[in-house]
Image: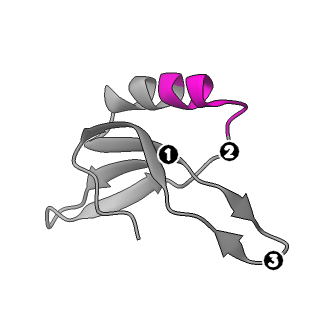
Amino acid sequence: MAFDRDENGDLQTVFGPAEQQNEERAIRTAKSLATKHAGVIAWNREANPALGEYGEPTVLFQAGDVPDLE
């Protein structure tokens, strides 16, 4: 995910979560986005969408200003 600040200084999502092939690629993508945005975060979590079950997120990489994950 990537974030920029709006005219009021509030963080706004400019790129929502995007599935990557593996953790290494997620980190590499986040590092690239970090040079262009106010904040980025790459994270993963265990999930079973069919059952609506989602585990707690684990941060793989974070840079800049990022809101709390819910």
Amino acid type of disc 3? Answer: Leu
| Secondary element at tag 3 | loop
Amino acid type of disc 2? Answer: Glu
Query: Which callout, 1 or 2, points to the residue nearer the camera?
Result: 1
- Residue under numbered circle 3: 51
Most common secondary structure along the magenta stretch: helix
Label 3 vs label 1: CA separation?
A: 21 Å
Please report the residue visible at 50 percent of the width from the left and 62 percent of the height from the top. Answer: 56
Please report the residue visible at 34 percent of the width from the left and 31 percent of the height from the top. Answer: 34
The front one of 52 and 5 is 52
Q: Please provide the residue range marked out in magenta.
A: 20-28
Q: Position of residue 10 (x, y in %)?
A: 20, 65
Question: Where, by quadrant of the figure, is residue 12 drawn?
Answer: bottom left
Label 1 vs label 2: CA separation?
A: 10 Å
| Secondary element at tag 1 | strand
Let me know if residue 26 is in the magenta part. yes
- Residue under numbered circle 2: 19
Circle 1: is it few (<14), some (14-19), or many (20+) Cα within 10 Å? some
Amino acid type of disc 1? Answer: Trp
